[in-house]
Image (tube, grey):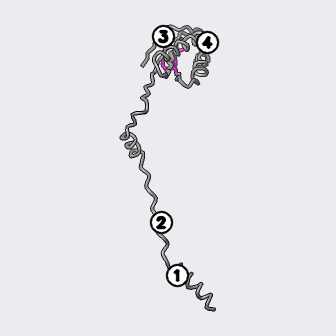
Amino acid sequence: MAEPKRHRDVLERVLERPPPPVPAPKPEPNMSEALRKLLNQGNPQQPVITPHVGILTLHFQLYACEDLKAKRKAFTAMKAVWGKEPDLAVAETADQDALDCATWTIAALGSSSQQISQRLDQIEKAIQERIDAAILDVHREIL
């Protein structure tokens, strides 16, 4: 009988001890602190990337568009073809409610102004071949 009592004593002593302290989790730095640290490090080995932006604005003259649905159908390729390109953004930027004209703008991103200029040349030529509307005015800007 002495043996069970000894086990009970050991068990009671173990249960009486307070549990070991659990270390508190380290608070994670918030985003502003992390960003501040990165900015203060200033890694001079990383190259500076300056993207160039080209903007092509086309003003179209439309004929025989009876309603806005017909007008939108005439420019379906603008969004369907060039709107899915990763380096382009395409939008109708003016004359949305006019039936006889339309203004579309295409923004292109690239690593050099020469690359953007070539890309905008390709797009303008493809639009002339694909869109059934006369181009009245073309405006380009490289930023």
Marks 3 and 4, how far apart at CA:
16 Å
Residue picked out by circle 4: 130
- Label 3 amino acid? Val
Q: Which residues are magenta?
A: 91-101
Residue drawn 56% across and 25% down? Answer: 86
Q: Position of residue 68 (x, y in %)?
A: 58, 18
* Label 1 SS: helix
Residue picked out by circle 3: 138
- Label 4 amino acid? Arg
- Label 2 amino acid? Val
**Label 3 neighbourhood size at 10 Å, few (<14), some (14-19), many (20+)?**
some
Residue picked out by circle 2: 22
Earlier in the chain: of badge 3 and badge 4, it is 4
**Label 2 neighbourhood size at 10 Å, few (<14), some (14-19), many (20+)?**
few
- The residue sitting at the right extreme is 1
Residue drawn 38% across and 40% down? Answer: 41
Residue picked out by circle 1: 13
* Contact check, label 4 and label 2, Cβ < 8 Å: no
